[in-house]
Image (tube, grey):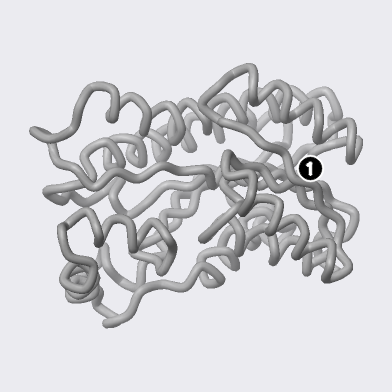
Amino acid sequence: MKFSGKVVVVTGAAKGIGKAVALLFAEAGAKVAVVDIDETEGKNTSDEIIKAGGEACFIHCDVGSESNVLRMIAEVTQTFGTIDILINDAALQLNKGLLDTSTEEFQRVLDVNVTGTFLCTREVAKLMIAQNKGGAIVNFSSTFAVVGSPGYLAYHASKGAIASFTRAVAVALLPYGIRVNAVAPGTTETPGLYDGARDTGNLETGLAGFLALQPLKRFGRPEEIAEVELMFASDEASFVYGAVWMADGAYTII
């Protein structure tokens, strides 16, 4: 299989896109470290992989905490010996605008989305450089990095930061053969979508409003985004560095 023997760390792998990515990597032969702050759902993802005949472990981690990330990296290497691929999918959404977002809420979104991506990338890059065999890192941006909306202020800021971070780190790690890219999903049918719709005050009305903005008149599926992330992690993308790929059903071109 395409990723046979590879060790992959997937943050945010308990639910949604992260879970789809973890399952798809396992199906392709990888050993998967399922990393998430949600212990119940994270263990469910890991158990699902193992029951299907794959190799996985669950590691509880708040990616916004440096001590948590250092412990997580140590546990992965103790379990699997190495890390070949990092998928930074952990994310926190908040459907609030400028005037309603508290300083604490803004900072927490940045802690998870931006600082978490930085910490995991830095520590895995150290390991990959020491191993001297290259590697691949895929970050999780969003269409919200390039378009505006009245809500999701902190999320917009964080995803724009990740897009810029990805390009900078791709340059920094290029000499070591470590490829860094990002996927920028559009509106995808995940638990976060339903949370955002509820934040509007009415779930059905919120979903209808989100759907009306979609050129394809449907939401993306987690599996569709996962396929793109696996492509960037694969040898087939060996000439791709610093890309921020829109996987958004034409949302940003219409």
Q: Secondary structure at mark 1?
A: loop
- Give left or right: position of 169 versus 252: right
Figure check: 94 above or below 123: below
Looking at the rendered image, the quarter that the N terminus falls into is bottom right
The residue furthest front is: 40
Residue drawn 55% across the image and 57% down it: 15
- In the orientation shown, which residue stands out farthest toward the bottom? 217
Return the x and y of residue 85 as percentages of the image width and height. Answer: 72, 45
**In this view of the protein, which residue sits in the foreground, 59 or 237?**
59
Q: Of 253 and 104, which appears nearest the observer?
A: 104
Q: Around disc 1, counting alpha carbons within 10 Å, would you say few (fewer than 14), some (14 to 19), or many (20 or more)?
A: many
Q: Quadrant of residue 200?
A: bottom left
Residue drawn 71% across the image and 51% down it: 43
- Say what amino acid the circle numbered 1 marks: Asp
x then y, percent, for residue 191: 42, 60
- The residue singled out by tag 1 in the image is 84
Work out whether 202 lies above or below 164: below
Q: Residue at x 52, y 72 (%)?
A: 224
Residue 235: x and y, percent? 74, 57
Q: Residue at x 35, y 74 (%)?
A: 219
User: Dividing the picture into quarters, in which one does residue 201 lie?
Assistant: bottom left
On screen, residue 59 above or below 210: above
Seen from the viewer's position, the closer of residues 191 and 9 is 191
Task: Tell me where residue 53 appears, x and y as whole percent.
Answer: 88, 68
